Every structure is written in structure tokens, then in C-alpha cells.
Amino acid sequence: MIKDRIQELMQQVQDMQAQSTEQMEALRIKYLSKKGEITELFNQFREVPKEEKKELGMQLNALRTMAESKLQEMKEVFEAQKAAEDKPDLTRTPEPIPLGTRHPLSLTKEEIIDIFSRLGFTVAEGPEVEDDKHVFGMLNFAPEHPARDMQDTFFVEKEDGVQKPTDVLLRTHTSSVQTRVMTSQKPPIRVLCPGRVYRNEAISARAHCFFHQIEGLYIDKNVSFADLKQALMYFAKEMFGPDTKIRLRPSYFPFTEPSAEMDISCNICGGKGCGFCKQTGWVEILGCGMVDPNVLESCGIDSKEYTGYAFGMGGERITNLKYRVKDLRLFSENDVRFLRQFEAC
Ligand code: DAH
């Protein structure tokens, strides 16, 4: 009886087929689960007379092994099919990869560097945490100059935690890099110094406790104010368009003599007068002048042999003119809705 049943099941197991993993599982349950037909035979096997046990036992084991290996084979086929389905389709059109954007202040900085590099300027950098000597002293600031006041400048605390004017401070302008370059290099010097600067200001749309400047310095024999004017005119036209005009107004900076502030014809109304330029047709973009002989001497450069010009401009100001970003706070909030608007730039 049991022998016939084994033969019957052998045949069934041999013919076993499944179209899906569900069908495969149903077969497993049918034959090999606790109540499965093969398991059932093992239960009946206990009642088989001793002398038949050996042969029937072998047949039964063979049946179970055959069922198990057939199911295992099926499983492997289904797994291989699934893996093939999950494989990436290399012929498919790729999904667009979202690109990041460059910060508008970086875009401006890079454009300025690019323009001045065509005039032979290279980039120099200096520390943001500076000392009084490089930020003020060597730049001809009088000892009692208000920039040295705690109201204007961030001084770095001494270890006792009490904030008071110390020798260590956050640089208030990139002119400090001038002194570093002049003391470490010999003329001719032609550098552009971009960087972050800090001032003790309440944060608003028009003022921030940190912002960016780009400084220029050119020292050589026979450098004149005409050279300065020519370089700045070239810059203005490259940056704001060939119709841009420049205007220099006398000014004062401790480190330049003579000093000037430069305006460009308003690039929004073309100089006719608008709300942006307060109907004047001009907007101020930088400070400049001939390097004061005292500065050259304090940096170890012979002021009888060499002269030079310097200029400094605000990165945010130029970016505002170029991209109309009016609120300074936007530059440091890192709001992607703002930054994404520069994707095409
Ligand atoms: N350091 C000045 C400031 O922070 C800007 C400046 C003016 C830099 C005139 C210069 C210069 O090099 O010649 O306002």
C-alpha cells in the first residue's frame, strides 16, 4: 500500500510545475508541510513491519529529497527571474540629476578675479582673525582712531572671558592683507585680496556683522593715479557693460593719499536717474587711492623708489548691482529658494 503511494507521489513530484512563487509555496505545503502528503507517509511508516522498513525507508527518504530539491530548483529559477527584472535598464533615458548652484557672492568674486587677472593680478589671502598691527597700525590709522573702538570692531576675548580691546580682533577690512603681502613680497606686487570681514553692527537689510570685500593692490616703480583710474575703468566696463561711465570723488582713508571714492553710472537706469540711484544717475562702488608713503615704509618698502595704488570694494554691493539682491541677510540665510535663482549664472 505505502509502497504504491510512494511510487505515485514520486511521479507527481517529478511532474511538479509552478508558474509563480505562490504556486511553488502551495506545492511545498501539499507535500512537505506538517500535514503534507509526504510527511503523512512518514507517519504511516511507523506502522510498517520491521522487515520492510529498510527498503521503504530508503524510498521514502529519496522521495522527500527529490521533492525538496525540485522545490529548491524552482526557487532558484524564480529568484533569478526577479533579479533580472530588478536590473537597471541601461537603455533608459536617465533621470536629470539636480545640480547645486554657486552662491551669488562667489559668482561675483570669481568674475572680479577673472577681470583683474587679465591685468596681471593674482589672488592673495590672509587671516580673518588678525592683530591690531596688520588691520590698523601699519595702515596709518591714528592710535585713537574710532575703528579701534569696541563699538565698531570685534575684539577676541582674553582667556578671563572679559571682552575688552585686545591686540587680537576680527579683521574689519581686507586692507589687512595688503600689509601681509607687502611685508612678505618684494615689488612689483599686483594682488587681489578677496575675503570675509567683520564689523560690530546690528543686523538689518542694509548692515550685517560680517560681509565680503575685495581689495586690490599694485606696487611698482612709477605707478600713478592715471594707472589706477585706467584699471578701474576697465573693471567697470567689463563688469557692468561697455557703456558704463566712472566718476572719482575725493575722499579720505588713512592708508591712501590722495584717496577717492568711485561711482559708476547707474546700471539700472543707464544714468538717467531712478529710485535705485536716488535720481542721481550714479552709484558708489568702491574706495581707492595711492598707497600712503607711511604705509609703504611701515611695510619695509622704499617710498622714494616705489609707488602704488589700492582699492577696496564690497562683494555684497557689487552683487546687489549685478543681481538686484537688496536684503543683505539673504546672503547668509542659505535659503535654497534664493540660491536656486542663480542656477543659470
Ligand atoms: N578698507 C576700506 C573699507 O573697508 C576700503 C578701501 C578704500 C580699501 C580705499 C582700499 C582703498 O584699498 O584704497 O572701507
Image: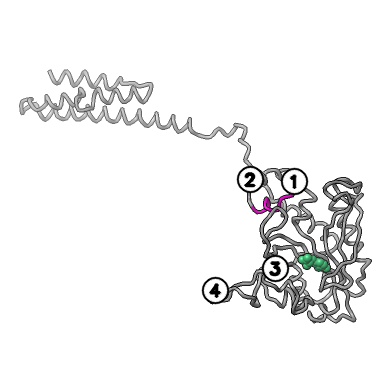
As measured in the structure, the alpha-carbon distance from the residue carrying label 3 to the one carrying label 2 is 32 Å
SS for dot 1: loop
- For marks 1 and 3, the one nearer the N-term is 3
Q: State the extent of the magenta-drawn residues as a range.
A: 325-332
Judge depth for marks 1 and 3 and give the one in front. 3
- Residue 191: tell me if it is visible: no
Q: Quadrant of residue 303?
A: bottom right
User: In the rendered structure, which amino acid carries the disc numbered 4?
Assistant: Gly
Vertical position of residue 47 compared to residue 187: above or below: above
SS for dot 4: loop
Q: Position of residue 328 (x, y in %)?
A: 70, 53
> Front-most of 185 and 300?
300
Left or right for 143, reference 336: right
Q: Position of residue 335 (x, y in %)?
A: 63, 47
Residue to which mark 2 is pinned: 336
Q: Position of residue 251 (x, y in %)?
A: 87, 67
Judge depth for marks 3 and 2 and give the one in front. 3
- Residue 274: tell me if it is visible: yes
- For marks 3 and 2, the one nearer the N-term is 3
As measured in the structure, the alpha-carbon distance from the residue carrying label 1 to the one carrying label 4 is 45 Å
- For marks 1 and 2, the one nearer the N-term is 2
- For marks 2 and 4, the one nearer the N-term is 4
Vertical position of residue 277 compared to residue 171: above or below: above
Vertical position of residue 116 compared to residue 277: above or below: below
* Quadrant of picture, ligand 1: bottom right
Residue to which mark 4 is pinned: 161
Residue to which mark 3 is pinned: 152
